[in-house]
Image (cartoon, helix red, strand yellow):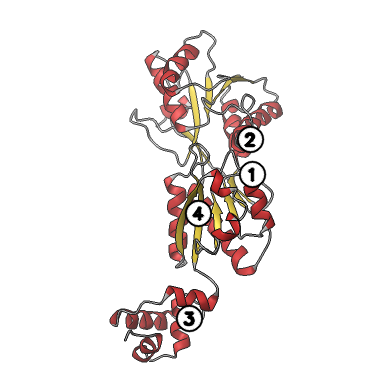
Amino acid sequence: MGVSLKDVAAIAGVAPITVSRVLNNSPLVTDITRTKVLAACRSIDYRPHAGARALRSKRFNTIGLLLPAEEGHMLLPHSLLASIADELEHRRIALQIIQLSDRQLTDADFMPRVLTERMVDGLLINYSVGIPDKLTTQVKEHNLPSVWINIKRSYDCIYPDMFNGARKVAEHLIKLGHQRIGFLDFTNNAFFINKPHYSVKDTYDGVCDAIEKTNFGSKLEIICKETIERKDRLSFMQGVLGRIDYPRAIITVSYRHALTCLHAALSLGIRVPEDLSIVTFYEKSIYDETGLAFDTVSVPEAEMGRAAVDMLLKKINHHENRIPSLCVDMPFTIGDTSDYRRKAGR
Protein backbone atom coordinates (compact mmCIF):
# COMPACT_ATOMS: atom_id res chain seq x y z
CA MET A 1 0.00 0.00 0.00
CA GLY A 2 1.38 3.42 -0.97
CA VAL A 3 2.13 6.25 1.38
CA SER A 4 -0.47 8.97 1.82
CA LEU A 5 -0.75 12.60 2.71
CA LYS A 6 -1.71 11.55 6.25
CA ASP A 7 1.58 9.64 6.57
CA VAL A 8 3.48 12.81 5.67
CA ALA A 9 1.48 14.80 8.21
CA ALA A 10 2.25 12.29 10.95
CA ILE A 11 6.00 12.37 10.26
CA ALA A 12 6.07 16.19 10.06
CA GLY A 13 3.88 16.58 13.15
CA VAL A 14 1.34 18.78 11.39
CA ALA A 15 -2.27 18.49 10.27
CA PRO A 16 -3.05 17.00 6.82
CA ILE A 17 -4.45 20.35 5.68
CA THR A 18 -1.03 21.90 6.36
CA VAL A 19 0.64 19.32 4.12
CA SER A 20 -1.90 20.11 1.40
CA ARG A 21 -1.16 23.82 1.70
CA VAL A 22 2.58 23.21 1.40
CA LEU A 23 2.13 21.07 -1.71
CA ASN A 24 -0.07 23.76 -3.25
CA ASN A 25 2.49 26.48 -2.46
CA SER A 26 0.10 28.36 -0.18
CA PRO A 27 1.39 31.62 1.37
CA LEU A 28 -0.36 30.67 4.63
CA VAL A 29 2.49 28.31 5.60
CA THR A 30 5.68 29.48 7.30
CA ASP A 31 9.08 28.68 5.81
CA ILE A 32 9.95 26.49 8.81
CA THR A 33 6.80 24.40 8.41
CA ARG A 34 7.27 24.18 4.64
CA THR A 35 10.82 22.87 5.08
CA LYS A 36 9.67 20.30 7.64
CA VAL A 37 6.83 19.01 5.43
CA LEU A 38 8.99 18.77 2.31
CA ALA A 39 11.62 16.86 4.28
CA ALA A 40 8.94 14.42 5.43
CA CYS A 41 7.80 13.96 1.81
CA ARG A 42 11.35 13.11 0.76
CA SER A 43 11.91 10.74 3.65
CA ILE A 44 9.07 8.42 2.54
CA ASP A 45 9.24 9.25 -1.18
CA TYR A 46 5.76 10.78 -1.21
CA ARG A 47 4.50 12.23 -4.49
CA PRO A 48 1.04 13.81 -4.85
CA HIS A 49 -1.28 12.03 -7.26
CA ALA A 50 -1.79 14.56 -10.06
CA GLY A 51 -4.98 12.94 -11.33
CA ALA A 52 -6.65 12.88 -7.93
CA ARG A 53 -5.64 16.46 -7.25
CA ALA A 54 -7.06 17.55 -10.62
CA LEU A 55 -10.39 15.88 -9.84
CA ARG A 56 -10.62 17.64 -6.49
CA SER A 57 -9.59 21.09 -7.68
CA LYS A 58 -10.90 20.89 -11.25
CA ARG A 59 -7.45 22.15 -12.26
CA PHE A 60 -4.65 20.33 -14.06
CA ASN A 61 -1.95 22.71 -12.76
CA THR A 62 -0.58 22.77 -16.30
CA ILE A 63 -0.32 25.56 -18.86
CA GLY A 64 -0.25 24.93 -22.60
CA LEU A 65 2.01 26.84 -24.98
CA LEU A 66 0.25 26.80 -28.35
CA LEU A 67 2.54 26.96 -31.39
CA PRO A 68 1.75 26.70 -35.10
CA ALA A 69 3.29 23.89 -37.11
CA GLU A 70 3.65 26.04 -40.23
CA GLU A 71 7.10 27.54 -40.71
CA GLY A 72 7.34 31.31 -40.41
CA HIS A 73 4.14 31.77 -38.38
CA MET A 74 5.84 32.35 -35.05
CA LEU A 75 8.95 33.68 -33.34
CA LEU A 76 9.93 31.84 -30.16
CA PRO A 77 13.46 32.80 -29.06
CA HIS A 78 15.13 30.57 -26.49
CA SER A 79 15.15 33.29 -23.83
CA LEU A 80 11.38 33.77 -24.17
CA LEU A 81 10.67 30.05 -23.85
CA ALA A 82 13.14 29.73 -20.96
CA SER A 83 11.53 32.59 -19.03
CA ILE A 84 8.07 31.03 -19.46
CA ALA A 85 9.34 27.65 -18.26
CA ASP A 86 11.27 29.18 -15.33
CA GLU A 87 8.31 31.27 -14.17
CA LEU A 88 5.96 28.29 -14.27
CA GLU A 89 8.52 26.11 -12.47
CA HIS A 90 8.82 28.78 -9.78
CA ARG A 91 5.05 28.60 -9.32
CA ARG A 92 5.12 24.78 -9.47
CA ILE A 93 3.03 24.66 -12.63
CA ALA A 94 3.80 22.31 -15.50
CA LEU A 95 4.29 23.43 -19.12
CA GLN A 96 2.97 21.48 -22.10
CA ILE A 97 4.04 22.40 -25.63
CA ILE A 98 1.18 22.08 -28.12
CA GLN A 99 2.19 22.42 -31.77
CA LEU A 100 -0.65 22.13 -34.23
CA SER A 101 -1.39 22.72 -37.88
CA ASP A 102 -3.78 25.37 -39.18
CA ARG A 103 -6.25 22.59 -39.98
CA GLN A 104 -6.29 21.40 -36.37
CA LEU A 105 -6.47 24.93 -35.01
CA THR A 106 -9.53 25.74 -37.10
CA ASP A 107 -11.37 22.47 -36.51
CA ALA A 108 -14.94 23.22 -35.40
CA ASP A 109 -14.65 21.62 -31.97
CA PHE A 110 -10.92 21.55 -31.38
CA MET A 111 -10.53 24.63 -29.16
CA PRO A 112 -13.01 23.45 -26.48
CA ARG A 113 -11.32 20.01 -26.47
CA VAL A 114 -7.81 21.36 -26.09
CA LEU A 115 -8.50 22.35 -22.47
CA THR A 116 -9.67 18.85 -21.56
CA GLU A 117 -7.93 16.31 -23.71
CA ARG A 118 -4.64 18.21 -23.50
CA MET A 119 -5.12 18.60 -19.74
CA VAL A 120 -4.23 22.28 -19.47
CA ASP A 121 -5.85 25.11 -17.54
CA GLY A 122 -5.08 27.83 -20.07
CA LEU A 123 -3.10 28.73 -23.15
CA LEU A 124 -0.18 30.96 -24.01
CA ILE A 125 -0.43 31.53 -27.76
CA ASN A 126 2.70 32.30 -29.75
CA TYR A 127 1.22 32.66 -33.21
CA SER A 128 2.55 35.89 -34.71
CA VAL A 129 1.61 36.08 -38.41
CA GLY A 130 -0.91 34.38 -40.65
CA ILE A 131 -3.26 33.88 -37.70
CA PRO A 132 -6.36 31.96 -38.87
CA ASP A 133 -9.48 34.07 -38.32
CA LYS A 134 -11.26 31.04 -36.93
CA LEU A 135 -8.66 30.60 -34.19
CA THR A 136 -9.34 34.08 -32.87
CA THR A 137 -13.09 33.47 -33.11
CA GLN A 138 -12.87 30.16 -31.26
CA VAL A 139 -10.88 31.68 -28.42
CA LYS A 140 -13.42 34.49 -28.08
CA GLU A 141 -16.56 32.37 -28.39
CA HIS A 142 -15.51 29.73 -25.89
CA ASN A 143 -13.98 32.19 -23.42
CA LEU A 144 -10.79 30.16 -23.16
CA PRO A 145 -8.23 31.46 -20.64
CA SER A 146 -5.64 32.61 -23.16
CA VAL A 147 -2.85 35.16 -23.52
CA TRP A 148 -1.19 36.03 -26.83
CA ILE A 149 2.54 36.69 -27.01
CA ASN A 150 4.09 39.13 -29.49
CA ILE A 151 1.03 40.39 -31.31
CA LYS A 152 -0.59 43.79 -30.83
CA ARG A 153 -4.15 44.08 -29.58
CA SER A 154 -5.92 45.98 -26.82
CA TYR A 155 -6.37 43.09 -24.39
CA ASP A 156 -4.94 39.70 -23.36
CA CYS A 157 -1.52 40.02 -24.95
CA ILE A 158 2.10 40.92 -24.24
CA TYR A 159 4.19 42.69 -26.87
CA PRO A 160 7.33 44.86 -27.08
CA ASP A 161 7.03 48.59 -27.73
CA MET A 162 8.62 48.62 -31.18
CA PHE A 163 7.35 52.13 -32.00
CA ASN A 164 9.11 53.87 -29.11
CA GLY A 165 12.14 51.60 -29.41
CA ALA A 166 12.59 52.69 -33.02
CA ARG A 167 11.92 56.31 -32.13
CA LYS A 168 14.75 56.24 -29.55
CA VAL A 169 17.14 54.91 -32.19
CA ALA A 170 16.22 57.55 -34.75
CA GLU A 171 16.50 60.38 -32.20
CA HIS A 172 19.97 59.14 -31.27
CA LEU A 173 21.14 59.12 -34.90
CA ILE A 174 19.66 62.55 -35.56
CA LYS A 175 21.48 63.96 -32.51
CA LEU A 176 24.70 62.62 -34.00
CA GLY A 177 24.01 64.78 -37.06
CA HIS A 178 22.82 62.14 -39.55
CA GLN A 179 20.59 63.60 -42.25
CA ARG A 180 20.24 60.47 -44.42
CA ILE A 181 19.11 57.39 -42.50
CA GLY A 182 18.59 54.01 -44.14
CA PHE A 183 15.92 51.51 -43.02
CA LEU A 184 16.95 47.91 -43.73
CA ASP A 185 14.63 44.90 -43.67
CA PHE A 186 15.46 42.04 -46.02
CA THR A 187 12.25 40.13 -45.33
CA ASN A 188 9.17 42.10 -44.26
CA ASN A 189 9.06 45.63 -45.57
CA ALA A 190 6.05 47.42 -44.09
CA PHE A 191 4.69 48.68 -47.37
CA PHE A 192 5.41 45.83 -49.73
CA ILE A 193 3.81 42.70 -48.24
CA ASN A 194 0.29 41.84 -47.15
CA LYS A 195 -0.52 41.78 -43.44
CA PRO A 196 3.00 42.19 -42.02
CA HIS A 197 3.66 41.59 -38.34
CA TYR A 198 2.80 44.68 -36.30
CA SER A 199 6.45 45.18 -35.35
CA VAL A 200 7.44 45.89 -38.95
CA LYS A 201 5.16 48.87 -39.38
CA ASP A 202 5.61 50.11 -35.80
CA THR A 203 9.39 50.15 -36.24
CA TYR A 204 9.12 52.12 -39.47
CA ASP A 205 6.52 54.50 -38.01
CA GLY A 206 8.66 55.11 -34.92
CA VAL A 207 11.60 56.18 -37.06
CA CYS A 208 9.38 58.43 -39.19
CA ASP A 209 7.86 60.01 -36.07
CA ALA A 210 11.29 60.98 -34.75
CA ILE A 211 12.34 62.45 -38.10
CA GLU A 212 9.13 64.47 -38.46
CA LYS A 213 9.29 65.91 -34.94
CA THR A 214 12.94 66.95 -34.87
CA ASN A 215 12.73 69.38 -37.81
CA PHE A 216 16.42 68.69 -38.45
CA GLY A 217 15.91 67.96 -42.13
CA SER A 218 16.76 64.26 -41.88
CA LYS A 219 15.38 61.94 -44.53
CA LEU A 220 14.65 58.23 -44.47
CA GLU A 221 15.57 55.81 -47.24
CA ILE A 222 13.95 52.39 -47.52
CA ILE A 223 16.98 50.36 -48.59
CA CYS A 224 15.17 47.39 -50.14
CA LYS A 225 11.59 47.13 -51.33
CA GLU A 226 11.41 43.39 -51.87
CA THR A 227 12.50 40.22 -50.10
CA ILE A 228 16.22 39.53 -50.54
CA GLU A 229 17.28 35.88 -50.26
CA ARG A 230 20.03 35.07 -47.76
CA LYS A 231 22.56 34.15 -50.44
CA ASP A 232 22.08 37.53 -52.15
CA ARG A 233 22.09 39.85 -49.13
CA LEU A 234 25.81 40.51 -48.87
CA SER A 235 26.18 41.44 -52.54
CA PHE A 236 23.03 43.55 -52.32
CA MET A 237 24.44 45.57 -49.41
CA GLN A 238 27.80 45.90 -51.11
CA GLY A 239 25.92 47.51 -53.99
CA VAL A 240 24.11 49.89 -51.63
CA LEU A 241 27.23 50.88 -49.70
CA GLY A 242 29.26 51.11 -52.90
CA ARG A 243 27.26 54.14 -53.99
CA ILE A 244 28.77 57.57 -53.55
CA ASP A 245 25.59 58.71 -51.82
CA TYR A 246 25.13 55.69 -49.51
CA PRO A 247 23.24 56.44 -46.26
CA ARG A 248 25.70 57.14 -43.45
CA ALA A 249 23.39 55.62 -40.83
CA ILE A 250 21.39 52.40 -41.14
CA ILE A 251 18.70 51.01 -38.84
CA THR A 252 18.34 47.24 -39.24
CA VAL A 253 15.34 45.32 -37.94
CA SER A 254 17.37 42.31 -36.80
CA TYR A 255 20.84 41.45 -35.58
CA ARG A 256 21.46 39.15 -38.57
CA HIS A 257 20.73 42.02 -40.95
CA ALA A 258 23.14 44.20 -38.98
CA LEU A 259 25.88 41.57 -39.35
CA THR A 260 25.37 41.50 -43.12
CA CYS A 261 25.55 45.29 -43.22
CA LEU A 262 28.75 45.28 -41.17
CA HIS A 263 30.30 42.56 -43.34
CA ALA A 264 29.52 44.53 -46.50
CA ALA A 265 30.97 47.72 -45.02
CA LEU A 266 34.22 46.08 -43.94
CA SER A 267 34.62 44.40 -47.33
CA LEU A 268 34.48 47.84 -48.96
CA GLY A 269 36.87 49.51 -46.51
CA ILE A 270 34.04 51.49 -44.89
CA ARG A 271 34.76 52.05 -41.20
CA VAL A 272 32.11 51.52 -38.51
CA PRO A 273 31.23 53.86 -36.88
CA GLU A 274 33.55 56.50 -38.40
CA ASP A 275 32.03 56.24 -41.90
CA LEU A 276 28.82 54.35 -41.18
CA SER A 277 26.56 54.02 -38.14
CA ILE A 278 24.62 50.78 -37.63
CA VAL A 279 21.90 50.21 -35.02
CA THR A 280 19.75 47.13 -34.60
CA PHE A 281 17.15 45.24 -32.56
CA TYR A 282 18.06 42.17 -30.55
CA GLU A 283 17.46 40.46 -27.21
CA LYS A 284 20.43 42.28 -25.66
CA SER A 285 23.47 44.31 -26.61
CA ILE A 286 26.11 41.80 -27.69
CA TYR A 287 29.61 41.73 -29.10
CA ASP A 288 30.28 40.32 -32.52
CA GLU A 289 33.49 38.47 -33.39
CA THR A 290 34.69 41.75 -34.90
CA GLY A 291 34.96 43.11 -31.36
CA LEU A 292 32.18 45.66 -31.86
CA ALA A 293 29.12 45.89 -29.65
CA PHE A 294 26.17 46.88 -31.80
CA ASP A 295 24.05 49.80 -30.71
CA THR A 296 20.98 47.82 -29.74
CA VAL A 297 17.33 48.27 -28.90
CA SER A 298 16.82 45.31 -26.58
CA VAL A 299 13.80 43.06 -27.07
CA PRO A 300 12.69 42.25 -23.47
CA GLU A 301 12.00 38.57 -24.11
CA ALA A 302 12.56 37.33 -20.54
CA GLU A 303 10.30 40.05 -19.14
CA MET A 304 7.65 39.23 -21.74
CA GLY A 305 7.65 35.54 -20.77
CA ARG A 306 7.21 36.28 -17.07
CA ALA A 307 4.50 38.85 -17.76
CA ALA A 308 2.59 36.46 -20.03
CA VAL A 309 2.52 33.77 -17.33
CA ASP A 310 1.39 36.28 -14.73
CA MET A 311 -1.41 37.59 -16.95
CA LEU A 312 -2.67 34.11 -17.82
CA LEU A 313 -2.75 32.98 -14.20
CA LYS A 314 -4.76 36.07 -13.30
CA LYS A 315 -7.28 35.13 -15.97
CA ILE A 316 -7.47 31.55 -14.70
CA ASN A 317 -7.54 32.27 -10.96
CA HIS A 318 -9.82 35.31 -11.01
CA HIS A 319 -11.98 34.36 -14.00
CA GLU A 320 -11.23 37.64 -15.74
CA ASN A 321 -12.51 37.70 -19.32
CA ARG A 322 -10.24 40.48 -20.53
CA ILE A 323 -7.08 42.05 -19.15
CA PRO A 324 -5.57 45.17 -20.74
CA SER A 325 -2.55 44.30 -22.84
CA LEU A 326 0.96 45.06 -21.66
CA CYS A 327 3.29 46.94 -23.99
CA VAL A 328 6.82 46.28 -22.67
CA ASP A 329 9.45 49.02 -22.87
CA MET A 330 12.52 48.42 -25.03
CA PRO A 331 15.74 49.96 -23.64
CA PHE A 332 18.33 51.36 -26.04
CA THR A 333 22.00 50.62 -25.34
CA ILE A 334 24.69 52.61 -27.11
CA GLY A 335 27.57 50.37 -28.13
CA ASP A 336 30.39 50.85 -30.65
CA THR A 337 28.57 51.14 -33.97
CA SER A 338 27.18 54.67 -34.08
CA ASP A 339 29.11 57.30 -32.14
CA TYR A 340 32.77 57.33 -33.18
CA ARG A 341 33.51 60.02 -30.58
CA ARG A 342 32.37 57.74 -27.80
CA LYS A 343 34.40 54.85 -29.20
CA ALA A 344 37.52 57.01 -29.47
CA GLY A 345 37.15 58.05 -25.84
CA ARG A 346 37.21 54.49 -24.54
Query: Which of pointers 2 and 1 indicates the residue nearer the eye?
Result: 1
Badge 2: how crowded within 10 Å, few (<14), some, or many (20+)? Answer: some
Q: Quadrant of the C terminus?
A: top left
Identity, as a three-letter code, of the amino acid under mark 3: Arg
Query: Which residue matches tag 3?
Result: 21
Mark 4: amino acid: Leu
Chain-order first, disc 4 or disc 2: 4
Q: Name the residue beneath numbered marker 1.
A: 152
Question: Of marks 4 and 3, which one's residue comes earlier in the chain?
Answer: 3
Q: Work out whether mark 4 precedes mark 1 in sequence or the reverse, and give the earlier one.
A: 4
Q: Nearer the viewer, mark 4 or mark 2?
A: 4
Q: CA distance from mark 3 to mark 2?
A: 46 Å
Instruction: Answer whether labels 3 and 2 touch (C-beta < 8 Å).
Output: no
Which residue is at 58% across, 39% downward?
A: 129
According to the image, label 2 marks what residue? 202
Tell me whether circle 2 and circle 1 mark residues in contact (CB < 8 Å).
yes
Residue where numbered disc 4 is placed: 65
Q: Earlier in the sequence, mark 3 or mark 2?
A: 3
* Circle 3: element type: helix
Q: Report how far apart the C-alphas of labels 4 and 3 lie in the structure.
A: 27 Å
Give the residue type at disc 1: Lys
Dot 1, how many residues are within 10 Å of its Cα: few (below 14), some (14-19), or many (20+)? many
Whichever of labels 2 and 1 marks the residue nearer the N terminus, that label is: 1
Q: CA distance from mark 4 to mark 1?
A: 18 Å
